[in-house]
Image: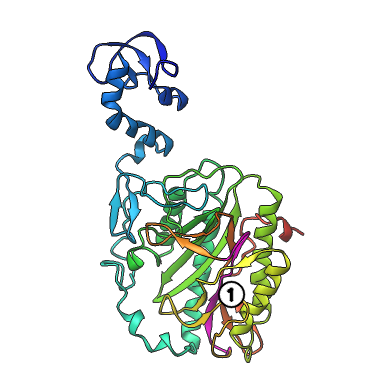
Amino acid sequence: MDGNSSMSVESPLSCAHCGKPARLQCPKCIELKLPPAGASFCTQDCFKKSWNSHKSVHLKAKSNTPAEHEGWLYCLRKGQKRSPSLPYFDWTGTLRPYPISKIRLVPNGIEKPDWAIDGIPKVEPNSDFQNIVEIKTPELIERMRETCRIGREVLDAAARMIRPGVTTDEIDEVVHKTTIAAGGYPSTLNYHFFPKSCCTSVNEVICHGIPDARKLEEGDIVNVDVTVYYKGVHGDLNETYFVGEVDEATKQLVRCTYECLEKAISIVKPGVRFREVGDVISRHASMSGFSVVKSYCGHGIGELFHCAPNIPHYGKNKAVGVMKAGQIFTIEPMINAGVWRDRLWPDGWTAVTADGKRSAQFEHTLLVTETGVEVLTARLPSSPDVYPWLKK
């Protein structure tokens, strides 16, 4: 603080360092519109001596973390470590992580996957279905239909929450409570130590964003990715939503991503090669001037959260195998406004675009039928009317 930037306080206050009457106020506190109490000093010398401790007030105010979020911590190392301060990282865009709340509890009566307690999947990594694409039995397919419908209803409940001023943690709370109310378990919760009940990916976040204390802002986009575990099976889906009014370029990105998924679904039927999905998606995205993320793919799903087949969304991929009736898998293209490359935040989960430009994603869980495809997570008549291109 120098003589030109400090401001005289109208009525005497106590110096935050020595307690003497003070008439100088920290200029940064004035800029952040913080109250004078605790930000006033009697001399430049007192201000300099208290700077190391006082500057934390600015960081806290910048995080816009309300009082009820005090004690929340930033996520580090796949949820196994937390930090009270913003981690250092060469951020690619304007978004920053915010503190996250404590892990949400699941009642004892809810059936849980094998990672619920200690964060480590036991059956999934060693299953034969990591290499062999399972043909589901009619009984298992029926359970999948039921679970996927619950997943759709949970995602729709989250969609109804989305507006400026809502935090992604509040969206997570709705996902958590709605899932449990239906008798399900939020599959992401403690999966490889993921600390939340859904993923919320804002703006330049491609996928696996962790719900936190940041408030959604006018013009943002946010993808909400929901997976429900119910009656021993998982149902997985996601959508990208507009927060208030967004710019035209963002609208084009989100619509193109939606269309990429629709075009990919339209070719699903017995005999189609898995690699063709990426060709269809890549062709449509590139025609619109967008790029396709290569690091994350669609996947098989059922009694396991992730299993074979692996379904890349980019063109000229080397995916092996053909579709057969009774298979269930996801297609979930991630489309970027700029380059396709991604980077990972220090939390070990949040994947962001390498150039900081926006990314959008849509996902469905699909059943290959004898004649084509059934979208198990399809939108319902009651689903929120949020996409202008779907209006009649």
Residue 154 can be seen, yes or no: no
- Residue drawn 47% across and 78% down? 301
- Residue drawn 58% across and 59% down? 359
Q: Residue 104 location in percent, x, y? A: 33, 55
Q: Nearer the viewer, residue 85 or 70?
A: 85
Residue ID for mark 1 = 313
Q: Residue 231 location in percent, x, y? A: 40, 75
Q: Nearer the viewer, residue 194 or 286?
A: 286
Residue 163 can be seen, yes or no: yes
Q: Amino acid at mark 1?
A: His
Q: Is residue 165 magenta?
A: no
- Characterize the local packing of mark 1: few (<14), some (14-19) or many (20 or more) Cα atoms within 10 angstroms: many
Relative to residue 70, is residue 352 drawn left or right?
Answer: right
Query: To which quarter of the image does residue 189 belong?
Result: bottom left
Q: Quadrant of the C terminus?
A: bottom right
Q: Residue 285 location in percent, x, y? A: 68, 68
Magenta span main SS? loop
Q: Quadrant of the N terminus?
A: top left
Q: Residue 272 location in percent, x, y? A: 63, 88
